[in-house]
Amino acid sequence: MSFINTLAWWQWSLLGLVPIGVVLLYFLKLKRRPLEVPSTYLWSRTLEDLHVNSIWQRLRRNLLLLLQLLMLAMIFLALTRPGWRDNALVGERFIFLLDTSASMQATDEGPSRLEAAKQQIESLIDGMKPGQTGMVLTSSNQSHVEQPYTDNRRLLKNRVRDVQASNRSSDLDEALRYAAGLANPGRSAASAQDVQVAEPMPATIYLFSDGGFATVPSFFLGNLEPKYYPIGQPEPDNVAILAFSAERNVENPLQTQAYGRVENLGAQPADVELSLLFNGRLMDATRVVIEPGATQGVDFELHDIGEGVLELRLDRADDLAVDNVAYACVNMPRRARVLLVTPGNDSLQLCLTTQEAQRVVELRVAEPGFLASEEYQRQAQTGGYDLVIYDRCVPEAQPLANTLFIGRVPKLEGWSAGPLQGPPIIVDTERIHPLMQLVEMGDVRIVEGFAVTFPAGGTALIDADIGALMAIAPRDSFEDVVVGFEIVTVNEGRTEINTNWPIRRAYPVFFMNLVRYLGGGRTTLALPWVPPGKSVSLNTSTPVDRLFVTAPNREVLEILRESTGEFMFTRTELLGPYEVREQRDGAVTQRFAVNLFNRRESQIKPAEKIELEHESIPAEASLEQSRGEGWRWLLLLALLVLCVEWYVYNRRVYV
Amino acid sequence: MARTMARLDTSLLPPDLLAKLERLELVSRKVFRGRLKGERRSRRKGQSVEFMDYRNYVPGDDLRFLDWNLYARLDKLFLTLFLEEEDLHFYALIDSSESMNFGEPTKLFVAKQLAAALGFVGLCRADRVKLQTIAGPHSLNAPVLRGRANLWRMLDYLNKLEPGHNGPLAEGVRQFCLRNTGKGIVVLITDLMDKSGYEAALRMLLARQMDVYVIHVLSPAELDPDLTGDLRLVDCEDQDFTEVTVSRPLLNRYKRTLAAFVDGAREFCTRRGIAYLMTSTAQPVDRLVSQYLRQRGLVR
């Protein structure tokens, strides 16, 4: 036989007084003042009359019986342990994980899904019993501990109320790992035998989300007990703009084309009207009908619009409004500032000075001796160039720019050159890389070259029998490309060609790709748009120390040049266009837009489960169902009835 | 209610009361036969001026009572019968149980006053007066008194009466009936607080064909109790107790019970020709005697 302790120590102490009280009640008699009277004859008859005549007195004996029966009934009922559904929490520690991603701004439930989730969390917090602790975690694409473990329910609820929605995407990985780290501390230890590992703190994690997460890889729950409560209606209605960009016609800079992609993520066909605005002025509109699950593209042609912000607006009220508007910034084209440092390379120079190239390239050619000049140092360290091509030369330090090394490797850790050998036979190229698009190297012959060893994160663009013949690797916010062979070489004072690449079609195509990818395309803006929360690297045409960024809410944020020489802007929480100025009240030098463009966030249908790599967390049907026990109250009531019965019997209460 | 000693310093019959009582006489609703000639009509046929009846003459009758007028008319001899005047027997039975020892003045004192007053009236009219208690030693040695000169003996007897002689009312009356064969007026002065009932006692008195008067004496505290709280009421006679929690409804119910008790006694007495008077010890005795008892025909 086993027993379950259902009471706290102080409750047991109180209960222990009950038998004493019962005994006292039994022996306790009401003190009555003795009084001598001539005769009790009439008093006895009076009491008898009351017994006989009073309805209440007739009931009194029955009342005692009723009270006794009532007490027995309560005891019997208590033995059946009646209970009810309660939002009380089961366990000792709880983690309330609240999804604050963009999809939680959907309004299909409550004022918003986030508010609905907050209300459910607050109801759970209200169900916390003494001794139970909880913490509040929020999660979008990064997690944040809003409130560490505490048993202060008011504090927990205040923290929950203060949680705000974000426009970020969803990523459960960090939040789960943080929560699991507390529940499974041994896993974070270097050795499982480490006796100094903290004791595991099993916890129940209550996740309130719509489940728009990618599968969390390599994650084990361990002592973590997950509970997933989906928020949102099973069939929400949402049409989202998933892409929007604007491209200026290179051949006709006065013409701009805007492209948009709209998807119906609801269950019903959607008849939507799309409006295109430029700097707040309506320029064009179109109407499309999109079937459920279908995508529709829209395009607009604009003439002579200058610089500004294009806004594509979905004129339709649905459950998620943040994906109903998209922005694209139209900046004046700026030619890439390319520095070619070469002792002499006619083919390369020719390639970069064609009419086509001149549209996108502002080329400066210098000899290797220029690298030691003060001008070069200043420009290189202040981002004066977008792309520097080192032909058979190597700078002492990498510039704040993308680089291309031809026949040399940069003086950076991770880069190294193999022995010169040849002729290397090209085996394969990385065709999907923007640099190698439409670059056919099959008919390129190379006299001699070396294998390129590149640092981690790099990619081999050309593979040869000797190894990587061309590679690209990131360096902070820049990228370095190394070509493992010279185009022209100097042998005993004579300039000789080392490869027939310059006479192949792939040669100018490669360098145009290079200029677009590492020159103007990346330096103006790495991507046409920026996801919310992502950092943006900004460059300037002048060596200023600070930039002023105006956010969509018109707040002006000042950013200083980093020690690495670049400007990193991180406060991209708000959706919309951002303006960059080099002077606080100066002209806008560039613009960039922050858009959601996240199909996973726009797909707001609540997920039925959350996938972990080795297990899944199914959705709970409703809030935690625990059992509220009522037997204590019934026993207390029975005790009260006993007291009432004693009172009625002893006091001989008469009406 | 406070328990007090029965003895009082004042006289049972103050002079002003005596003056009023002298003018009264006891009246019997029945005609009884007394032992001595008194100023009473008797059913005995005797010598008086009041004609009662005729009967045939038989040798040996007193010739003085022959009705010659009737002989002249009927030529027969008839003897005239006259009612004989005799004296009245007056009995006062006083309840001296412990319950009579309550009130201010005590019920026993009031009972003694009433008995004294009525006894004095009887003495003034040369009635045969006997006052006694229902129970106790004084019930056996009560003097029979006649004439005003025996007033002091009556008062002396009454002053010696003490409460505390408990016993059933019926038993006391039975003893009285056994010891007193004479008929007459009997006034029972009691609080009727006998748990065995009063009916048997009154029936015994009726069976003796007495002219019964019941004076039901109660104290104001019994009529309108001023009690509060949780009490254990202890009967002073048998120590029986009743636990009550006094409340307004309970007091109202008690009064109704008392009223029903009084009504019950009144009805019992009325049905049987017993004169019933309920009085409080707060009532002056002279008013009781001269007003209430006069209305009931005990005195005139």
Image: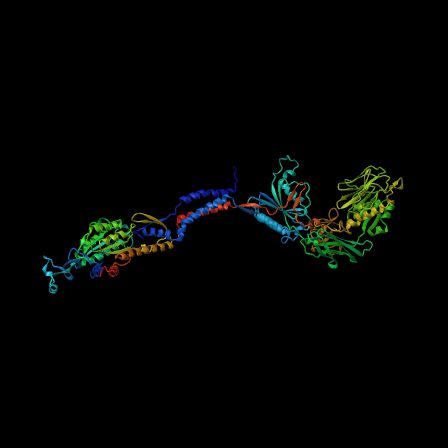
Compare residues A143 and B57 and report the one nearer the observer: B57
Instruction: Give x and y (percent) for residue A306.
Output: 78, 57
Instruction: Give x and y (percent) for residue B124.
Output: 18, 59
Task: Give the farthest residue toward the front.
Answer: B75
Q: Residue at x 52, y 40 (%)?
A: A5
- Give the side of residue A226 with respect to residue B99, left or right: right
- Count of numbered badges drawn on the protein: 0
- Give the side of residue A556 with respect to residue A651, left or right: right
Q: Residue at x 84, y 39 (%)?
A: A425
- Give the side of residue A112 with respect to residue A489, left or right: left
Q: Residue at x 82, y 55 (%)?
A: A252
Task: Give the farthest residue toward the top.
Answer: A193
Q: How is the image coloured?
A: rainbow
Residue B51 visible in the shown view: yes
Is residue A335 depicted above or below A188 in this figure? below
Instruction: Give x and y (percent) for residue B153.
Output: 18, 54
Where is the C terminus of chain B found, in terms of image quarters?
bottom left
Is residue A506 depicted above or below B275 in this figure? above
Compare residues B164 and A63 and report the one nearer the observer: A63
Residue A655 visible in the shown view: no
- Give the side of residue A321 with respect to residue B139, left or right: right
Compare residues A364 and A449 and report the one nearer the observer: A449
Instruction: Give x and y (percent) for residue A330.
Output: 76, 54
